[in-house]
Each structure stands twice: as C-alpha cells, then as structure tokens.
Amino acid sequence: MSARLRVLMVCTGNICRSPTAEAVLRHKLAAAGLDREVDIDSAGTVDYHVGSPPDRRAQAHGARRGYDLSRLRARLVRADDFAKFDLVLAMDSDHLEYLTERCPEPRRERIRRLLEFVPGRSSGFDVPDPYYGAPAGFERVLDLVELACDGLVEHLRQRVATGSP
C-alpha cells in the first residue's frame, strides 16, 4: 500500500531538529498503526550538511528515548517538495518565512509550524536550535517534538480516516 499522506519536517541544516522530528513522528506513527498511511522526510534550508548524518548529539539523545536517526541524511528543501508533501512543517519562524517565500501561493496552506500541533498551545511555536547549546537543549527539543508529534498523529489519523489529502 502506498502512503496517502506525506509530511516534510524542515529546519536549518537538517541535522538536529528536523531529523529528530522525522524519527519521532515515524516511531509514533508505527505505534499508532499509521506508518503505511503516512510518508515522512526531512530537509534543511541551507546546504552546510547535505549528505551528512544527523548530529551525533541528536542521535545519542534520540536513541536514549528509542528513536533511530542513524540512517537519515541531510538534504535541502527542493522546489518540488511543495507539490509532493501535504504538510511542510517548519521548526521555527525563520523556516516558516523561508518556506512561505519559496512556495507557490496555491500551496502555502500546506506550510505550518510543527508546534502548532501541540494540543492547547497558544504561543511559543519555535523549536529552539540546540546546535550551539548544552545537552539539555537536545532534551528540550525532544520534549517539544514528542508533544507536537502526539498532536500531529491525531491530526493525521483524522485525515486518513476522512481521506483528506
């Protein structure tokens, strides 16, 4: 069975936040029995790390919670991603602006911030970049991403059930 929905996670270099979000969502979709209904990928807005695996710290912190980031490789957002993906999820407001500027007008409704899916959240929609910070930053990213992916799984479950692209 081919995936009915496609989700793209986007951060700066595609080595910390967006691959973490990809791995968390992949894990949660499998647990919910939706892994065959939703295809997930991640990408970055800059080409610093294209082809590289996720940051070793992101991999280590993710592994402690049961998420495998080791097979992922950084890539850039491409123009065809806006047509290919049903949801393009930015990790912060800079990514949101970057994506919105490059996305054709009719597809802009596909672009959102990941933290919009945290149930009951009304502010603070940026996933902080842990790259230059302490190990606690990677844990904070995981905490936020897990909360958002719980809400995202429910959103995707509803879309799958109604056949909504």
Image (cartoon, rainbow, N blue to C red):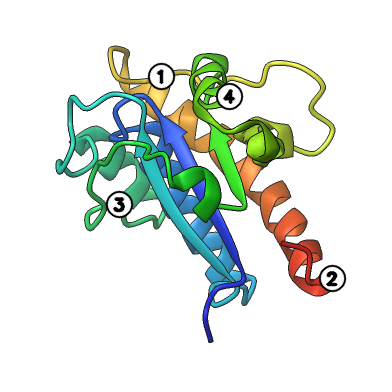
Between 88 and 35, which is closer to the camera in this rendering? 88
Q: Which numbered mark, 3 or 2, is in the foreground of this view?
A: 2
Q: Which mark is residue 100?
A: 4
Image quadrant where one finds the C terminus: bottom right
Q: Earlier in the sequence, mark 2 or mark 4?
A: 4
| Rendered image quadrant of residue 135 | top left
Q: Earlier in the sequence, mark 1 or mark 2?
A: 1
What amino acid does circle 1 point to? Asp
What amino acid does circle 3 point to? Leu
Residue located 27% across and 41% down the image: 75
Residue that numbered label 2 is attached to: 162
Q: Position of residue 133 (x, y in %)?
A: 32, 13
Q: Earlier in the sequence, mark 3 or mark 2?
A: 3
Q: CA distance from mark 4 to mark 1?
A: 20 Å
What amino acid does circle 2 point to? Thr
Q: Which mark is residue 129?
A: 1
Q: CA distance from mark 1 to mark 2?
A: 35 Å
Label 4 crowd (10 A; few <14 / some 14-19 / many >=20) = some
Between 82 and 53, which is closer to the camera in this rendering? 82
Label 4 secondary element? helix
Label 2 secondary element? helix
